[in-house]
């Protein structure tokens, strides 16, 4: 009997050893594990909250994108006529960026163009709403149609444009429009995460991500009044007029310009801050156009060389290189060679700041200008005029 127990024990031991070896070497032979799939699971949810400042930092931006996407529309202009003497009509990069067909028109003909861009619904009522976009998207358009996120295609009309900032406001009739929430672009800082939403190359609504890489960009030579947000979020042809939003889905800017040698994104894009866009939009909706102050001068930056030759204490201010005859500046006693150092008590650092401050003055009012003339500061009072609307050159 004892011998039988020993044989049984040895059999069980050998069997368990064989099963153990098979389990280690070929686990797929194990019959009770064939229906089990091993996966790696993260212990962190897809949209997690991390400690930070007052703004919530999210690992996923799906909520922000979903919140803003319903307010971004595709803008198609069915017919655009470009004057044959347009200064950029022959530029291949301009043609590629704006979708201008190659080749020259026949004598007496003007090319018919198909232009695609984006827009942002900024206001809605029971009958329709207003859409903010770029002036160059709708320039010379005979017919404008908006493609909404819900599949509807609605006609739109231009309420007014402002070529100086490259902004335009459209009116669209329809119900159920979803206006975007405005953010605070003045509180944005370099390094903030942003999303760009638009319709690049006409492929359909697209969301790209990046950060704010610079603020207050100007001197790009694109618009007369520039104060761009620079971002590395991919902005491509067709994104013009689309939304640049923060991680909460609030509008920070209107995508407008890219720096590119190929026509595609190279990681340097520019958006018009919503603070500037809001002011322009409200004036267009209220008055049909934008009114800016005007004194009739040609400004010039004060370089260190100019400061030395003019014996100025520092290279700051805006040099008046010429004064238009009969202009508010001429009538107020401003002269060529004066250096504007303050407007309404606010220090002026350069010509960009000077023109922005003059534009913000209300026509018909008097404003105080501090200028340096022959080494001494002179106080002038000018009656502000209304800046003429510039000719469209897009």
Image (cartoon, grey):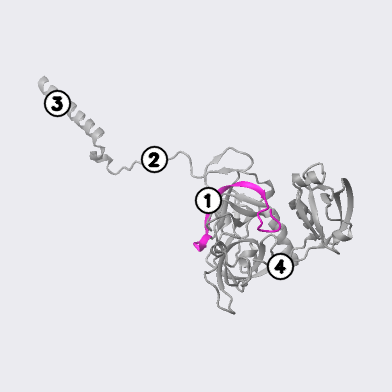
Residue at image coords 52%, 42%: 48
- Foreground of the two, 284 or 212: 212
Cα distance between the residues tagged 1 and 4: 42 Å
Q: Which mark is residue 16?
A: none
Residue at image coords 78%, 51%: 318
Cα distance between the residues tagged 4 and 2: 62 Å
Q: Helix, strand or loop at disc 3?
A: helix
Cα distance between the residues tagged 4 and 3: 104 Å
Q: Are marks 3 and 1 in contact (CB under 8 Å)?
A: no
Which of label 3 and label 1 is nearer to you?
1
User: Disc 4 marks which residue?
Assistant: 391
User: Disc 2 marks which residue?
Assistant: 40
Q: Is residue 180 left or right of residue 280?
A: left
Residue 328, horizontal then vertical, whole percent: 85, 61
First in residue order: circle 1 vs circle 4: 1
First in residue order: circle 4 vs circle 3: 3
Q: Helix, strand or loop at disc 4?
A: loop
Please state the extent of the stretch shown in magenta in the rendering.
200-226
Q: Helix, strand or loop at disc 1?
A: helix
First in residue order: circle 3 vs circle 2: 3
From this viewpoint, which residue is outermost toward the bottom?
A: 108
Residue 101, horizontal then vertical, whole percent: 53, 69
- Asked if the stretch drawn in magenta spans residue 357, the answer is no
User: Disc 1 marks which residue?
Assistant: 62
Within-10-Å neighbours for mark 4: few <14, some 14–19, many 20+: few
User: Disc 3 marks which residue?
Assistant: 8
Is any part of residue 125 visible from this angle? no
Cα distance between the residues tagged 3 and 1: 64 Å
Within-10-Å neighbours for mark 2: few <14, some 14–19, many 20+: few
Residue 88, horizontal then vertical, whole percent: 61, 65
Corner quadrant of residue 160? bottom right
């Amino acid at each position: 009997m004892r011998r039988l127990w020993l044989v049984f024990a040895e059999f069980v031991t050998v069997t368990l050893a064989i099963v153990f070896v098979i389990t280690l070497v070929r686990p797929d032979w194990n019959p009770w594990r064939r229906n089990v799939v091993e996966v790696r699971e993260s212990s962190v949810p897809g949209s997690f909250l991390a400690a930070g400042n007052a703004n919530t930092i999210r690992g996923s931006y799906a909520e922000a994108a979903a919140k803003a996407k319903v307010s971004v529309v595709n803008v198609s202009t069915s017919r655009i006529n470009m004057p044959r003497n347009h200064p950029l009509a022959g530029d291949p990069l301009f043609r590629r960026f704006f979708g201008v067909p190659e080749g020259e028109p026949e004598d007496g003909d003007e090319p018919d163009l198909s232009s695609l861009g984006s827009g942002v619904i900024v206001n809605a009522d029971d009958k329709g709403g207003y859409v903010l976009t770029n002036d160059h998207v709708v320039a010379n358009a005979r017919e404008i149609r908006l493609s909404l996120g819900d599949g509807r295609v609605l006609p739109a009309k231009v309420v007014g444009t402002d070529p100086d900032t490259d902004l335009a406001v459209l009116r669209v009739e329809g119900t159920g429009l979803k206006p975007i929430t405005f953010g605070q672009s003045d509180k944005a800082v370099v390094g903030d995460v942003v999303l760009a939403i638009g319709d690049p190359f006409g492929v359909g609504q697209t969301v790209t991500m990046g950060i704010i890489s610079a603020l207050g960009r100007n001197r790009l030579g694109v618009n007369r009044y520039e104060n761009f947000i620079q971002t590395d979020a991919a902005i491509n042809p067709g994104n013009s007029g689309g939304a640049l939003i923060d991680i909460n889905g609030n509008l920070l800017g209107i995508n407008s310009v890219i720096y590119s040698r190929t026509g595609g994104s190279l990681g340097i894009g520019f958006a018009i801050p919503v603070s500037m866009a809001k002011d322009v939009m409200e004036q267009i909706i209220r008055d049909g156009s934008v009114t800016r102050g005007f004194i009739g001068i040609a400004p010039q930056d004060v370089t260190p060389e100019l400061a030395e030759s003019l014996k100025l204490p520092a290279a700051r201010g805006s040099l008046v290189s010429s004064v238009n005859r009969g202009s508010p500046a001429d009538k107020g006693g401003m002269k060529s060679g004066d250096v504007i150092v303050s407007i309404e008590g606010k220090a002026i650092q350069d010509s960009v700041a000077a023109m922005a401050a003059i534009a913000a003055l209300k026509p018909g009012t008097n404003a105080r200008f501090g200028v340096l003339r022959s080494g001494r500061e002179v106080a002038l009072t000018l009656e502000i005029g209304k800046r003429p609307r510039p000719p469209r050159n897009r």
